[in-house]
Image: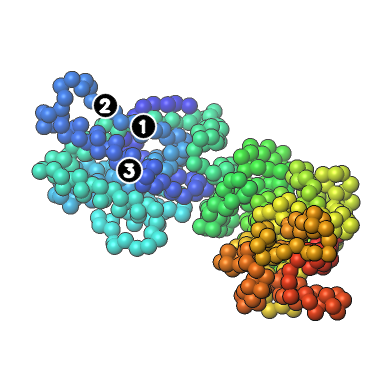
Amino acid sequence: MKADTVQLVHIFGTDRRHVVPVFQRPYVWDEERNWAPLWSDVRAAAEEVEAEMNGTADAFSGTSRTHFLGAIVLERMPPAPGRILAMNVIDGQQRLTTLQVLLVACWAAAREHGAENAEGLLKLLLNNTEQLVHKQHPYERYKVWPSLPDRDAFKALFAAQLPLARPGEHRLIAARRYFDDEMSAWLAESPDPVERADALVIALRERLGLVEIQLEGHDDAQVIFETLNDRGTRLRASDLVKNTLFRLAEQQGEDVTALHQKYWVPLEAGWWGEEVTTGRFKRARIDLLLSYWLSIHTGLEVPVERLFADFRRWLASSKASAAEVLADLAHHGRAMQRMDSLPASDPTGRLLQVLNLLSTTTPVPILLHLQANDGVSAEQRAIAAGAIESFLVRRFVCGLTTKDYNRLFMSVLQNLRGADAAVVGEHLRNQLAGQTADSRYWPEDGEFMKGLLQRNLYRLLRGPRLRVLLGGLESHLRGEKSEMAFSPAWAAKLSVEHLLPQQWEQHYPLRTDKPAERARELRENAIHMLGNLTLTTSKLNSSISNGPWPVKRAALNKHAVLLLTSASVLQAPSGLPDDMSRSWTHGWNEDQVVVRSAVLGAVACFAWPR
């Protein structure tokens, strides 16, 4: 490995091409973090030159400064007869590409102001000698040839004047507009724009420095790339995985351009780059896909933080070719997109919403594995999703720990990989039912009902878990014949309403058939029970929260549409004695709460069967 400090003219002033491999990530630099600091350095260097040319430089400033722009890592590509020397860009593609955008903007500005000398010198930094460009490879005129998704936009940069801006244009075009605006304003400040343009060219050629690292035959380009990018940068784990796979594909003699177009380009769509919240962190979907996919193949939890290191270990032990890995990854990517679009009426879609509410992703690799396996029927997927949801809900209602879920679901996943696709959902259900450890068992109906009827349910489950429970009850009450399924995501937007208010003293007198102390105890016990809770909109909740029962009942009659309210609060549940049914809506006290708790508890046992 040979490292030198070089001027920009060394990089772009000779006939040399800097080729960004097709498998590297697209252009991602932006104004705040990249373009503006670069222009600030260039402007400062140019103004120093200008001051020296005008004789106004500080006599005590010492020798001229070099403004360093960072490092690039290059690997000389095998020479080809009649072709311009090409350097493979191992690292620094963002920097090199941005410098070309800046130079194009400088060239356009010099041309606009009639600075012919500056225009000519800048053109030498943008284009290789025309006579050396191979007729069958016209793109060799460019000093930098960017990654595949950026090439059309890169070629469009070289117009003397850009067309009018349009929404959603490529980031490279946006960079050119930024530098155009800055350059135009800066040149306009000078009484002699031509002289200022000449000073700019001197600064660009002689005062901007880079560290150029050229790899030699015994250097491992992949190790260098990882060392520079695996820590402390904005590169995602998926960028490192991508680089590893396509370098391997090159070594295996594959057509990397075709592989990239077929398998990776779909994974570079905007949806995959969007960050989604998983637990306490936000992750890009592409990184989550890789994490889930690697868990499927290893049977181990793969946190995004360890994704690249774990992937390298797996790849080293795997006998799969790069093409096979890319094809399988793309297949799982399509499955993940299908899975993400499932409605709440689909058990898997519903479970994903529940997991999102609970801020957990531990079972997702299992769901992705089942979705990607074309031999698994919708019925078996439904059985698996229903079992996982029941397992989770029953355990949190019973106040049981979640600390072993990662290992449990990875163990289940390992066993599923060899299961018969025709019964894989049943196999998963049986695995969960067979767990006996305290941290893993699936509660029976008796323990589940005991948890549902506890007097402090609201305080124990408050927040997402309570909404999952109440929303699930609503969904089950509606059944398959309802015009509209109730989504767990809707429950997240609703408020939990205490029918018998927490501040009950003013409008809800204690019963008189019990001693006062016992009556108060019964009242306090009922406040946070399941039977005293329902879901309403926030506005309805705030308007009726502590109001008297006739007012609250009238408002619920007018606005409440959930069966959770209408079928067991605004009318008596079926099967009650006639006298209790007739008086059910006349008032609301601990008697109704206890009865409704038992009714909803029975519904819950059917909604989440074991």
Q: Point out the tag, 1 or 2, that comes first from the N-terminus.
A: 2
Q: Point out the tag, 3 or 1, that comes first from the N-terminus.
A: 3
Q: How is the image coloured?
A: rainbow
The x and y percentages for residue 173 are: 35, 54
Looking at the image, residue 257 sits to the left or right of residue 171; the answer is right
Disc 3 on helix, strand or loop? helix
Looking at the image, residue 476 sits to the left or right of residue 538; the answer is right
Residue 350 seen in the current view: no
Looking at the image, residue 9 sits to the left or right of residue 352; the answer is left
> What residue would you read off at disc 1?
210
| Amino acid carrying mark 2 in the image | Arg
State whether residue 348 is above or below residue 177. below
> What residue would you read off at disc 3?
36
In front of the other: label 3 or label 1?
A: 3
State whether residue 558 is above or below residue 203. below
Which residue does the image show at 15% across and 21% down from the upper left?
Answer: 59
- Residue situated in front as seen by the camera: 500 or 489: 500
The x and y percentages for residue 362 are: 71, 49
Measure the C-alpha gap from mark 3 to mark 1.
Answer: 18 Å
- Residue situated in front as seen by the camera: 165 or 359: 359
- Residue situated in front as seen by the camera: 289 or 577: 577
> What residue would you read off at disc 2?
65
In front of the other: label 1 or label 2?
A: 2
| Amino acid carrying mark 3 in the image | Ala
| Amino acid carrying mark 1 in the image | Leu
In front of the other: label 2 or label 3?
A: 3
